[in-house]
Amino acid sequence: MSSTDPDDLRPVGDGPTAEPAGREPTPAEPIPAEPTAEELERTAAPARLRRAPRYRGFALAGALVGLVAAIVAVAVSGPAEPGAPLGTGSVLALLAIVLGGFGALLGTGVAVLADRRSVRRSRRAAEDDGASSSAG
């Protein structure tokens, strides 16, 4: 018989105070209620709201734009000449690597600029709450 067999279930613990398996014991202390508004105001620390950009998304978008630019450039240039040292596929691969990398760098640069802008526009949560409550 394996240890996971349901016929092998026994009470948890030893002695008469043991709980049967499958039944959860009751907690010794009651679960505290949610704090009141006064308690929250007394203990809460002011925070800054900031919407920072996702760098990975900007870099991937830039790389995708570079890849599309490479495909368009190869499509516009037409097929390679018969004696050319690089074929169309090689040119596409080279342009995709170069333009994709450049696009990723450019996208990351845009993310850095957006991040700097978000730092300037960040504000305290308490100020935001006061403005939204006085508007209504």
Image: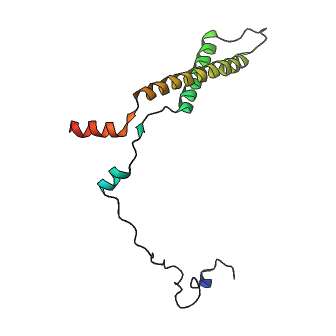
Q: Quadrant of the N terminus?
A: bottom right
Depth check: give the residue in front, 33 or 59. 33
Percent x, y of residue 14: 59, 87
105 up-or-down from 29: above or below: above
Q: Which coloring applies here?
A: rainbow
Q: Residue at x 68, y 12 (%)?
A: 79
Depth check: give the residue in front, 17 or 120. 120
8 up-or-down from 102: above or below: below
Residue lying furthest bottom:
16
Depth check: give the residue in front, 42 or 61. 42
Residue lying furthest left:
136
76 sits left or right of 33 in the view: right
Q: Residue at x 65, y 21 (%)?
A: 96
Quarter assignment of residue 109: top right
Q: Residue at x 61, y 19 (%)?
A: 71
134 sits left or right of 67 in the view: left
Percent x, y of residue 22: 51, 79
Quarter assignment of residue 30: bottom left
15 up-or-down from 32: above or below: below
- Mark count: 0
Percent x, y of residue 65: 56, 22
Percent x, y of residue 66: 59, 20
Quarter assignment of residue 51: top left
19 sits left or right of 91 in the view: left
35 sits left or right of 91 in the view: left
Q: Residue at x 48, y 25 (%)?
A: 116
95 up-or-down from 111: above or below: above
Q: Quadrant of the C terminus?
A: top left
